[in-house]
Image (cartoon, rainbow, N blue to C red):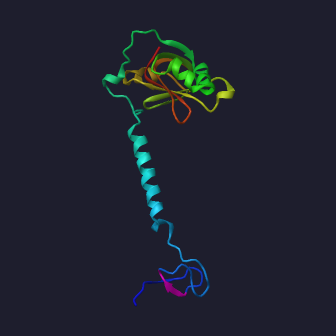
Amino acid sequence: MSEKMTKCKSCGNDIASSAKACPNCGAKNSKPIFKKWWFWVIIVVLLIAIIGAAGGDDTGSSSASGNDVVQSTEAAIKVSADDLIRAYVNNSVSADAQYKDKLVTVSGTIYSINEGYVIIEPDSDDLWLNNVYAYYNSGEVEELAAYAKGDKITMTGECKGENIMSYVEIKYCTIN
């Protein structure tokens, strides 16, 4: 009988790979976690979730596509960053009904200007965890160069609601 042998992790004696415990010291003989089938199932599920989340993310920098301009005949809803964030913090379902997929003009203080988006922070201390991410059109780059952190800004774009990270997204923004 040529059974595969392995070393006991506890006492170092040779034991059969299929043994549940070491006959010498009684220590359990278990496979490493990466050799268990359920470990690989979890890894595959996590990879699919990560790829799905990354594939569905259209927050990259704007290009000269048809998405650069919001086509709307309705008037923009004017709202401060504080009021918009507070609406989503208090009741995201109600806020979606009021703002989601609508043209909004948001005013607030610049927290940072990044490639593709501006982070607008609330002025209220109780909302410090939440921000508005305003994804700007490619034609706004030159005008944004004149702004800095702490400046007041007003941007108009299409509200996409609150994302999983608890910030409100505004897409296809132009500076007013």
**15 magenta-colored:** yes
Identify the residue at horizontal 53%, vertical 17% (top origin). 98
Range shown magenta: 13-17
x, y (%) of residue 29? 54, 77
Whether 78 is drawn above or below 53: the answer is above
Residue 94, quarter of the rendered image: top right
Can residue 151 be seen here? no
Whether 34 is drawn above or below 9: the answer is above
x, y (%) of residue 116? 43, 30
Q: Nearer the viewer, residue 36 or 157?
A: 36
x, y (%) of residue 134? 48, 25
Identify the residue at horizontal 49%, vertical 18% (top origin). 155
Residue 90, quarter of the rendered image: top right
**67 magenta-colored:** no
Quarter of the N terminus within the rendering: bottom left
x, y (%) of residue 166? 56, 33
Q: Nearer the viewer, residue 58 or 9?
A: 9
Q: In the image, 147: left or right of 123? A: left
